[in-house]
Image (cartoon, helix red, strand yellow):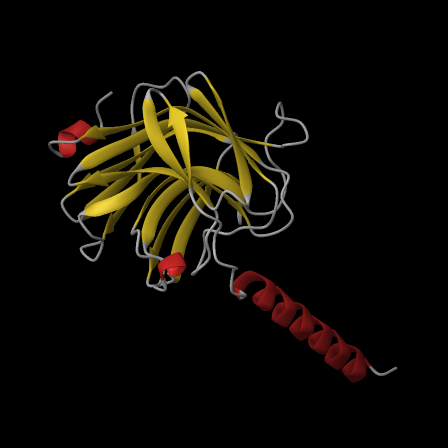
Amino acid sequence: MSRRRILIGGAVTLLAVVIVAAYWFLRPQAPPEPAQPLAYAGQTWTVFRPEVFDVVVEGNRMRLTLHRVARWAGNGQGGLVYQEASGDFRLTATVRARRASDPTQTVSSIVSLGGLTARNPAGADQGGRENYVHIVVGNTPSGVGVETKTTVEGATSYEAVPDASGDAELRICRIGSNFHLYKRSVGATTWVLAATYERPDLPERLQVGANIYSVLNPDLQVLIEDLRVEAAPDKAACEQG
């Protein structure tokens, strides 16, 4: 077989893989099952897309376990546990992305992540497009680390920063139309700004909370501790506490 034929055959195979992957990634999702209430930290939260993940509350911890492919990317939707928040706020939690098969180990399944999100409720499940910002930890497209993402009308941009750990304290802070996303090591006292997104398109009232997702067959459990939504009167409040 000539070298040219080998190259053509390889290109065709690669194209087929790309087409299959694109279909798998971009295919429409079924409508979500009805949302469910969840009692956590003395408050009522809402479980969105309960068909894709399980949630167990253990004191100040939520244990989220993904049991099928579900993606917070493009116009896709993964799992979400949220409250609604208006105006300026800060959303904070300690997040650990682990293997469901062995929660003592950092997650290793491809693009398997969890963390915090602030989302426009009028998303794909309501006949619209997805609009949100998020900061997550786990196995990013660049390996284990932290990912920040902004999705505008179903078009996603992200930045993945490798890190030695799949555990971090995360925060989203909204001040006006700006969303400041922070991270720090568990137990650290200083917040590190990971990204700032200007999103004047996002409405006053948002769904804010903890998310989980994976683009391929997952082995993912996300532990969320001390999840809380608080008022943020100014930018200084974003880096306090």
Extreme residue toward the right, this view: 1
Give me the residue at 41% from left, 30% from top. Answer: 38
Apparent side of residue 228 relative to residue 103 in the rendered image (left or right): left
Q: Position of residue 225 (x, y in %)?
A: 42, 23
Give me the residue at 54% from left, 65% from top. Answer: 27
Q: Quadrant of residue 40?
A: top left
Q: Position of residue 217 (x, y in %)?
A: 65, 48
Give me the residue at 62% from left, 22% from top. Answer: 104
Answer above or below: position of 212 versus 103.
below
Image quadrant in which the C terminus is located:
top left
Q: Nearer the viewer, residue 159 or 221?
A: 221
Give me the residue at 20% from left, 35% from top. Answer: 89
Answer above or below: position of 173 versus 25.
above
Q: Quadrant of residue 2?
A: bottom right
Q: Nearer the viewer, residue 191 or 101?
A: 101
Residue 37 visible? The answer is yes
Image quadrant in which the N terminus is located:
bottom right
Q: Position of residue 218 (x, y in %)?
A: 62, 43
